[in-house]
Image (spheres, grey):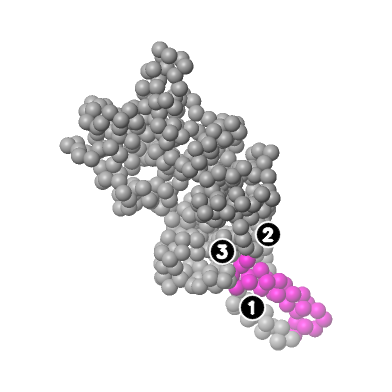
Amino acid sequence: MQKLKEADLYKGELIPVNGKLVERYNKCLVKLGFTETKLTSFFIDGIGWSPEIAEEKDEIHYLNHGEANPHCIIITPLQKGLPVYNPYHSFDKELMKLVFKKHQSRIENITRDSAICVDFDQDIDVFYEPLDVLKYKGITVKFRLVDDLDKAKEEQLQLVELFKIENNFIDESIHQRLLDSANKYGDLREREINLENITYETESFYTEAFGGVYVLKSFLSPILVFENMDAFQEAIQDTSHNVSMYHISHDDLIEKLTSHLMIECDVHSEITLQRYDRIKKYVLAEFINEETHVTKNVLNDSMLFKGYLNKIDVSARKRVMGLDRYLEKKKSDPKTKVTDFVDKDIYIALHSPHSSLGPNEQDLVWKLLVSISPKDVLFLYWYDKEIFYDLYQNWSSSLKDWVIETIKKNI
């Protein structure tokens, strides 16, 4: 991953945590019911997730209590706008935007000397079966302060009122209680530290529960797309819900999404052709076994590209150049079908979210498409970094250079 790190493409926007912030972070872990980290320094993302702690605990979603109870830790206002690198739900980043939009000034105030535990509560204590994901309706974002700072403020205000009653101003025990509270928490009387709950209404979303499920709600009945075959097989036994269910590998999924105006494919558009240029270069790279030239140069130089294209067998050549062959044939025979020339996975990779969808739903559909067919390295990096990082580790050094260059050009 060193090349990605040097290019600032591997979790480069994490912020460091050390010193007193580690202590506050540990207090949050304990308050949420987890064990402390033994690390003295680490990095966190926008939701307070740390790759170092995940490795230490050998648990990628260590801020979850089971699949139904995710949490967040806020220890600095610098978390505002940061990426969420391992979101449990596709809407986690939206939740964090709402949190900072509504409470930024109070977060800044609180995190001067404290920290905030956040619960994403969907009124589901535990999942029992895959179709429980249909219970997601509204998410209530709830806040708890380390050291119960909000309760300490209420106690200080009550002590002040008690101090004002009759001759209590000469009561040394009340003096001492006020001093003890002030020494421990500071003067909280004028601090704005109360954080109201936030409600977020879920639309279509992705959750990593049950091995990964896409819940597409923009229809008379929802469409569920499962990444885990066992979860899918269990789900289809349940006939009590009016839903359509697919495994991500099913051939008829693309047809279903197209007919429901979730995705579309215009192979003549300039944007699609730009994506195809990246895709066919990546596909050619998959066939290059022996190279006189480095892969990066082969993919960037049209003459070298043609040279290596002619070195692979005819079936591989047809796979790489499928769309070019289709567009050429289409000129003389309007009845030509794109699927007669373009392999299924490449054709899927050429699809895009339907233009009628809103921004969040488009992002969700992009994630689904790149998960089905991870052939466009740029969109894969944008919409499913974990798949990207997994594939990246198996690429040649030179292909990594081309991929990094391709991403950097489009940032």
Q: Amino acid at mark 1?
A: Ser
Query: Which of the numbered marks, if any, corresponds to residue 181?
Result: 1
Amino acid bearing label 2: Asp
Q: Quadrant of the C terminus?
A: top left
Position in image of residue 81 (x %, y %): 52, 50
Give 394 or 122, whichever is nearer the viewer: 394
Q: From the image, give the main secondary structure of the stretch colored magenta.
A: helix
- The boundaries of the magenta stretch are 142-170
* First in sequence: mark 2 vs mark 3: 3
Measuring from the top left, give residue 139's x and y in whole percent.
65, 54
Q: Residue at x 36, y 40 (%)?
A: 408
Q: CA separation, marks 1 and 2?
A: 35 Å
* Towards the viewer: 28 or 128: 128
Image-quadrant location for residue 57? bottom left
Q: Residues within 10 Å of mark 2 (few under 14, many from 20)?
A: some
Q: Residues within 10 Å of mark 3 (few under 14, many from 20)?
A: few
**On screen, 61 above or below 328?**
below
Please tell me the numbered disc located at residue 66: 3
**Residue 379 seen in the current view:** yes
Dividing the picture into quadrants, the one containing residue 103 is: bottom right
- Label 2, secondary structure: give it: loop
The answer to whether mark 2 and mark 3 are in CB contact below 8 A is no
In percent of width and height, residue 27 lies at: 54, 72
What residue is shown at x 30% (from left), y 39% (from top)? 286
Q: Is 168 in the magenta? A: yes
Left or right: 376 as drawn, with respect to 242: left
The structure residue drawn at horizontal position 46% and vertical position 64%, both measured from the top left corner, is: 59
